[in-house]
Image (cartoon, rainbow, N blue to C red):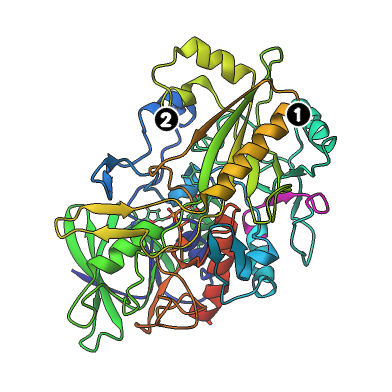
Amino acid sequence: MSEQFDLVIIGTGAGGGTLAYALRNSGLRILLVERGDFLPQEPQNWQPVEVFDRRRYKPDETWYGADGKPFHPGVHYFVGGNTKVYGAALPRFRVQDFGAVEHEGGTSPAWPVTYDELEPYYARAEEIYAVHGASGEDPTEPPRSGPFPFPAVPHEPYIDDLSVRLRNQGLHPFHYPMGIDLRAGGRCIRCKTCDGFPCQVLAKSESDVNCVRPAMESQNITLWTNTLAHRLLTDSTGKRVVGVELERGGEKLTVHADRFVVACGAVNSALLLLRSANDKHPNGLANSSGLVGRNYMVHNNTALMAVDPFRRNPTVFQKTMAVNDFYFRGPDFAYPMGNIQLLGKLQAGMLTAAQPLVPRPILQGMADRSVDWWVMSEDLPDPNNRIELRSDGKVIVHWTPNNLVAHRKLVEAARQMMRAAGYQFVFVQPMGIETNSHQCGTARFGTDPATSVLDPTCRTHDVENLWVVDSSFFPSSAAMNPALTIAAQALRVAERIGG
Ligand SMILES: Cc1cc2nc3c(=O)[nH]c(=O)nc-3n(C[C@H](O)[C@H](O)[C@H](O)COP(=O)(O)OP(=O)(O)OC[C@H]3O[C@@H](n4cnc5c(N)ncnc54)[C@H](O)[C@@H]3O)c2cc1C
């Protein structure tokens, strides 16, 4: 069986979904290929035990560390990809993140585009993803061509009080930009099961809801779910991709097109390129630089629970605030440290997976009295941190975290901040190899084919009709959540592909 399209986009997450949306009226006949299905709207969407203990929405897939230890990766194979469960925090990167930045652990490289070049696309991405935010609160915020599409998600009273306590320390807590449907008549009920959960009422600004479904209204877009892209095929010169081998409903088929976009997420995109090795591309498709799968980054992440045993935290929708005062430097540290953002309210059922030995009533008591943060620092590209595909199909993730001094400093600063805000107990949980939610870097973009896989428009240097449009293109991870930047670049690339 064989089919012909103008463009095939493989993957429907933040990158692929946004690209499809941007090209829906381009006149191109587009096939969207997605290995997963639509995520069902069901009561289990909001059940912590189902989502966290039973991993209901994660694939039954095992990857391995370089030490051979197996782990279950934080990936989600559905229409919308990882945005189906994401926290919907949609900040822009800072201006400085696009330049070379000296860190304690090394240099974070410059991007081949500036903030100013990406700004119009950030603005458009914020519209598409209905971002709510407030300007003028965060001293690190980049300039904007216009206001946020929607006003900030208001803090609940307990968080408002915490914000005052932080401001009294001279800090600048700010309303974090969030993509949820709080418009007049909007679907969001501001529940406690947002960050890390699928949204049962489809009120989160996800690639599925905000991009793929509207894109499907165009006659030109065809979506094939439950369809795995196995291999890309080139012509005899190796300069053009001519087809993609797919597995659909137990059948194998090849689809032909003029142009191809890989948007499978940073690890799976690298795997697809590596699996597509042929005579002309012996080390993997578009891999003359040897960098496909390398420079894997995920951020250095720590969850922090600050507990005041004498005060309950009644907040339901907690993810509304962040602190960037340590983003560029700390009080006693001349290097960037990172971002501290509230998590969705932790519940006992979310903690049992990480703390199986602690009795549930104790976890419940803590969760009732805690305020919960995600402490996130930039990690640096290291070619030795890489995705390896073994000949037996095993996926090995070589990952040695770096720039850790900065992260430890940030965790300590967050701890001090919460102690000074009146929290007697602060518990921290560093995240391990399975927390790869912010995976990126495995096909970095740049101007030099020797040191990058993609050009500044995300087209591969080696193959003229092949693009990679997902978090793989990041040359550095910054210390902000990635999805809005992935979406903005997808909009920018759409102009090149569709123009
Ligand atoms: C729990 C969690 C919370 C998060 N919170 C935030 C947040 O608050 N803010 C933020 O900015 N980011 C957040 N993220 C990260 C964000 O979701 C990702 O950065 C973003 O979704 C990445 O987009 P992508 O297009 O690179 O990949 P993905 O969104 O992962 O999409 C890849 C798609 O490709 C499909 N696919 C993979 N391989 C194949 C194949 N071989 N054939 C066909 N299809 C394939 C997958 O099924 C998937 O649909 C979070 C992630 C997680 C897991």
**Residue under the point 47% across and 68% down:** 473
Find out if the beta carbon at label 1 lies less than 8 Å from the nearest ligand 1 atom. Answer: no
**Residue under the point 71% across and 15% down:** 311
Q: Residue 420: which numbered mark, if any?
A: 1
Quadrant where the N terminus sits is bottom left
**Residue under the point 43% across and 76% down:** 452
> Which is nearer the eye, 241 or 486?
486
Label 1 element class:
helix
Name which quarter of the figure residue 204 lies in.
top right
Q: Nearer the viewer, mark 2 or mark 1?
A: 1
Name the residue type under label 1. Answer: Ala
Name the residue type under label 2. Answer: Phe
Vertical order, 132 against 356 (above or below)? below
What is the residue that sits farthest to the left in this orientation?
Answer: 392
**Residue under the point 62% across and 54% down:** 129
Name which quarter of the figure residue 141 lies in.
bottom right
Residue 204 in view here: no
Vertical order, 290 against 307 (above or below)? below
What is the residue that sits farthest to the bottom in this orientation?
Answer: 237
Q: Check residue 121 for magenta coloring.
A: no
Q: Residue 220 in the image: x percent, y percent? A: 44, 69
Q: Which residues are magenta?
A: 127-138
Mark 2 lies on residue: 52
